[in-house]
Amino acid sequence: MMKRMLLPILSVVILLLLSSCWSPSGSTPNQKRAVIDNMQNETLGQLYSQRPEAREIIAKAAGYAVFSNINVQVLLLGGAGGYGVAVRQPSGEKNYMKMAQVDVGPGIGLHDIRVVFVFLSSQAYNNFVSRGWEFGAQADAAAKARDKGAAATGEVSIDAETTMYTLSESGLMAKVNLAGTKYWKDETLN
C-alpha cells in the first residue's frame, strides 16, 4: 500500500518544486525579460571563459538559445522546468521561451544548469523555435555548492546543424535516465 502511494506523492512534490522554476522572477513582462536577458549574458560570459572557442562559433551561427533550468530527481521520477531566450543572428531578434522535462530512471538530487544551443543554419534555428522538442538518454554526475565542488561544461553535437553546451550552476545530482524535453515560445513575453 505504501509503495503504491509513494510514486504519486513524489510526482506531486517534484511538480511543486519545479513550478517555481518555470518562470523568471518579476511581476511584469518587462521585468521578466530583463531577468532572462541578464541570465543570457551571464551564461554566455561563463561559457566564453570556460570554452573561449565558443565565442567565435556563436558569432558565426545563424542563431543560439540560452536556458536556465532546475532539474529534480527523486528515485525513479524527475523533471525540470525553466526559461530562456532564442536569438536569431545577425538581426538580434529574440524569442522568449519556456522549457519542461520529464525524467524516468534511477537517481536523486537537485541540479541547476544552463544550456546553450548553437544553430549553424537558419533552418535549425527555425525548427527549434517553432517545434522545440528534444528526446534523449543521458547520464549525469555533478557536485557543486556555490564556489565549491566540481562542475563541468559539456559540449554535444545534436545533429550536423546544432550544438549544445551545458554548464552546471550548482547542485548535487546523480542519475541515469531517459528524458523528454519540450521547449516552446512564452506567449506572455513575446
Image (cartoon, rainbow, N blue to C red):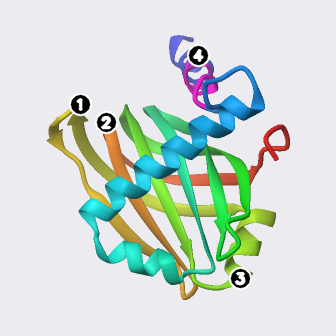
Image coords of residue 178 (percent x, y): 52, 54
Q: Is the magenta stretch mostly helix, strand or loop?
A: helix
Image coords of residue 51 (percent x, y): 28, 68
Q: Give the residue type that dot 1 points to.
A: Arg
Above or below — where is 32 with respect to 116? above
Instruction: Looking at the image, tell me whether mark 2 or mark 4 is earlier in sequence order.
Output: 4
On residue 122, the disc is: 3
Residue 20 covered by magenta stretch: yes
Instruction: Looking at the image, tell me whether mark 1 or mark 2 is earlier in sequence order.
Output: 1
Do labels 1 and 2 touch, CB within 8 Å? yes
Image coords of residue 27 (percent x, y): 72, 20
Q: Nearer the viewer, residue 122 or 72?
A: 122
Above or below — where is 62 with respect to 1? below
Q: Give the residue type that dot 2 points to.
A: Ser
Image coords of residue 90 (percent x, y): 65, 77
Instruction: Looking at the image, tell me whether mark 1 or mark 4 is earlier in sequence order.
Output: 4
Q: Give the residue type that dot 4 points to.
A: Ile
Q: Mark 1 points at which residue?
A: 146
Do labels 2 and 4 touch, CB within 8 Å? no
Q: Name the residue under label 2.
A: 170
Corner quadrant of residue 109:
top left
Tell me which residue sits at (71%, 82%) in the image: 122
Q: Which of 133 and 104 is in front in this view?
A: 133
How many neighbours does mark 2 have within 10 angstroms: few (below 14), some (14-19), or many (20 or more)? many
Tell me which residue sits at (76%, 32%) in the image: 29
Q: In which quarter of the image is the N terminus?
A: top right
Q: Mark 4 points at which residue?
A: 9
For the residues marked 2 and 4, what is the alpha-carbon distance in whole angstroms?
A: 26 Å
